[in-house]
Amino acid sequence: MQPPEVQNESYPHGWQLLPSAPMSDWQPVGGFDSEAACEEARRQRTNDAIDRAHTTVGEEAKYDLDVRRAVNARCVAASH
C-alpha cells in the first residue's frame, strides 16, 4: 500500500504524501502470497525508484515522487 497524496506547493514537486492517513485511504499497489514476498517486492521497488531517480535527477533523487511513494509504502495483511 502507498499513502495518499495531496497537492501542496510547499512540498517537493508540489506533492505531499500523507503516511499518517488512515490505512483505508491508502492505495493498493500489489498483492502477494506472503509478507516476505511483499517486503522483498517493496525493497526492490524502492531500489528501482532510487536508481531511476539518480539517473534522471541526480542528487535531488530523494525528492522524486516515485522514490517518496516507494519509501513510504507498507505491506499490510489483506482484510477479508
Image (cartoon, grey):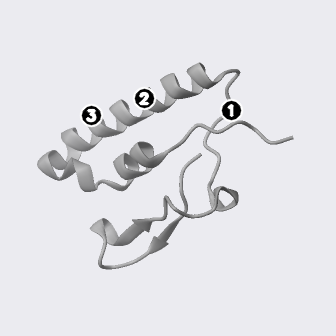
The extreme left residue here reads 59
Reply above or below: 16 against 79.
below
Q: Label 2, on which residue?
A: 43
Q: Label 3, on which residue?
A: 51
Q: Quadrant of the N terminus?
A: top right
Task: Choose mark 3 or mark 1, whichever is in front.
Answer: 1
Q: Label 1, on which residue?
A: 31
Q: Quadrant of the C terminus?
A: top right
Reply above or below: 51 against 70.
above
Q: Is the C-beta separation of discs 2 and 3 under 8 Å? A: no
Residue 11 in picture, x, y percent from top left = 31, 71
Identify the residue at horizontal 44%, vertical 75% (top origin).
7
Residue 46 in picture, x, y percent from top left = 39, 36
The extreme bottom residue here reads 9
Identify the residue at horizontal 75%, vertical 38% (top origin).
78
Identify the residue at horizontal 28%, vertical 66% (top origin).
12
Reply above or below: 75 against 41.
below
Specify the amino acid type for callout 1.
Answer: Gly
Residue 33 in picture, x, y percent from top left = 70, 21
